[in-house]
Amino acid sequence: MRRRSSITTLEKSGSKAERPLLAFRSMDSNLKRWLPVGGVFLGYVLLSSGALLYWYHPVYLTQWQEGEVWTYRDLFAPFEYRVFRGTQEGQAWDSLGPSLTLIFERDTSVKQRVIQRLNEVSPRFSPSLRSEVARLLRYAYRFGYVDVPVAGKQGQAILREGPHTEEVLPLDALVDNQRLERWISETVSENRQDSIRWVVQAFLQPDCRYDPNAVHELLQATAKQASPYSTTVHKGELIVRRGQLISPEVAQKLRSLSLAYGSLHPLRSRLLSFLGLVGLVGLLTFIALQYLYVAKRFQPEEVRPVLLLLSVFLVTIVGASLFVHFAQRWTETTQYPLYHLFPVALAPIMVAIFFDDRVGFISAITLGAQVSLVMEEPVEFFFVHGLSSMLVVFRLRVLQRRSHFLYALGTLALGYWITFLGYHLFRTGSFETISWAGLPLLLVNVLLCLMGYPLVYVLERLFRMSSDVTFLELLDLRHPLLRQLAEKAPGTYQHSLAVAELAEVAAQRIGAHSLKARVMGLFHDIGKLENPSYFIENISAISQGGVSNPHYYLSPRESASIIRRHVEYGVELAKKYNLPPEVLGGIQTHHGTTWIQYFWERQKREAPQEAPLVEEEFRYPGPLPATKEEAILMLADSLEASTRALPDPTPENLRAHVRRLIQQRIAEGQLDRAPLTFEQVRQLEEVFYENLLNQRHTRIPYPEPALFQKSV
């Protein structure tokens, strides 16, 4: 519940001249709070986009052989291009024909820079070495030192200097690295060859740079005029079907497609692709993070949940990219749709276990869309795996037994099969065309998702976050802390069991995490183990053995200090026994900042003339409850304890007491940080009344047994 302050920020801020400065400082402060999360978000977007792009390229353009079977999916032309005979470049440079024309851009300043750099170090060379270096320069730059291999190729080279100057030379007049190495081996004495090679590596630079775009334009013009076999492949036209033999004609279409890809400014194209991916991945991830913060009400400083979520996302995306990269090679020996093997549903399952089904649902959508970008059939993959992942997370809404995890995987298998068959029937309208091999692959996918259960333990340790699996383990009443509580503080133990029961049913009623609320109720008072005899629920049990109330011998300040101390000691025990942060939060907030009313009133009565009382000595340290579960625990704890003191617990008195205590906590501001609505408060009032009424039920008094005397 949140209350509006009667004094606004502007009224506190002073003069109008100060308001822009204060607003700027406030904005700057908020920005700093979000910086860690923003850094994690940006790092994830860049890394995941890089991973998606690094392996996302048409490997099928190079990984094939003429005369073999095409093992990839049906290939359609992504754009319109011309088919040329015997022309390849870029990724297939070594397959260029033996006779061709290449175009280079010559930069005469390169030679001058190389000579200048050599002049700076040549005084340290011996005279004979300087002579060899001079011969090397004359040989390398006589006609041109090129940056691509030309040895063994016949044809001519066009050297361009600026837009108007050209020189035509035979290719064998140019020098490349291979010819330079042969020249060194044949003309330089053996004792100086290493020195000359060092000079080549350290100083020499090509002055002629290959221009693939100009060559492609020349080849297009030449082929259009001279080749009777050139054709045009239109966008969307089928090039080759899966399982088809790669004929010479198909091979030439593939070579030409590879050539066309190489002429489309690869660096600029990759950069634009990367920027596009950054936009898509960034938007999808922002949606998931926004929902995470809204649904779970995390603070900007809480980076750990974001780290967990985005780490799961990143591992999934990198794994998907690697899987696709290697699966394209495996398809050479199988016709199965191997992309159905990748268990993308594992990530939403992990997210749902650590957060809730709502965050898991959003993760299934956003992550499924990102992974689909690199899959062979992206639309089919998203429908089958994305929709099935959305379905399985709802089965994880309640995970209170290990069998629930198996039931969820059964739901995943059912979702896989329904979406797989539905998608293919919609696309083809026939059972005969369905690739039935996909169904067993999806079953293997479900088995791979079994890794999720042990992975929960690993993620808990890595990110120090708790899941439902941890809370299930903490329900065991044989936990060392609960056993100590039962032995040393039996009254507190019974109180904790009752509070846990109340908190669980209340959480179920308003849609909070009931399992977490129950565990928080079990452990919220473990701090009373330090001084169990000083708490009223244990005093009655102890006093039966002849021990009076120890508070009679203490001042109100001392008593209040002991009572307050159970929160601090409970936190210490929780940390010592590695209890989850949620349980620790319940221990800290189950009293909020409420008064230790009894000893406060007693102090005022017994010592009215003393120095002014310090309120903090008679208040719990807080903080206030900030989650639904913490708010429920505070109310359940107060109501369970206070209703035991009702002199006449009739249904009417009990209902009035429940309403009065809840309204009192609201009026005190104890629920200001809790994300509760008025409707949920009303529901809590009703469920507490119902369950407390059952706990405080009355019985009909039994009559005294009649005394029978044995007649004589």
Image (cartoon, helix red, strand yellow):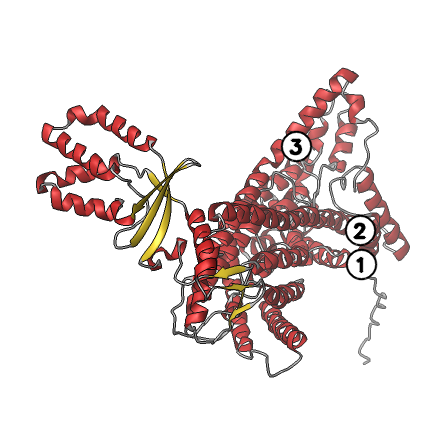
Snapshot quadrant of residue 158:
top left
Residue 134: horizontal and vertical position, in percent?
A: 18, 32
Q: CA distance from mark 1 to mark 3?
A: 49 Å
Give the answer, above or below, for where 121 lies relative to 665. Answer: above
In the image as oriented, which residue stretches furthest toward the right? 652
Along the line of sight, which residue is nearer the eye, 691 or 59? 59
Crowd around label 3: few <14 · some 14–19 · many ≥20 (10 Å): few
Specify whether residue 371 is in view.
yes
Asked which secondary structure carries label 2, the reply is: helix
Along the line of sight, which residue is nearer the eye, 556 or 224? 224
Contact (Cβ within 8 Å) of mark 1 with mark 2: yes
**What's under tag 2, amino acid-wise?**
Thr
Snapshot quadrant of residue 434:
bottom right
Along the line of sight, which residue is nearer the eye, 320 or 657? 320
- Mark number, residue 643: 2
In this picture, residue 181 sits left or right of residue 31: left
Disc 1: which residue: 696
Q: Earlier in the sequence, mark 1 or mark 3?
A: 3
Q: Earlier in the sequence, mark 1 or mark 2?
A: 2
Q: CA distance from mark 1 to mark 2?
A: 8 Å
Residue 157: horizontal and vertical position, in percent?
A: 33, 47
Asked which secondary structure carries label 1, the reply is: loop
Disc 3: which residue: 30
In this picture, residue 51 sits left or right of residue 592: left
**What's under tag 3, amino acid-wise?**
Asn
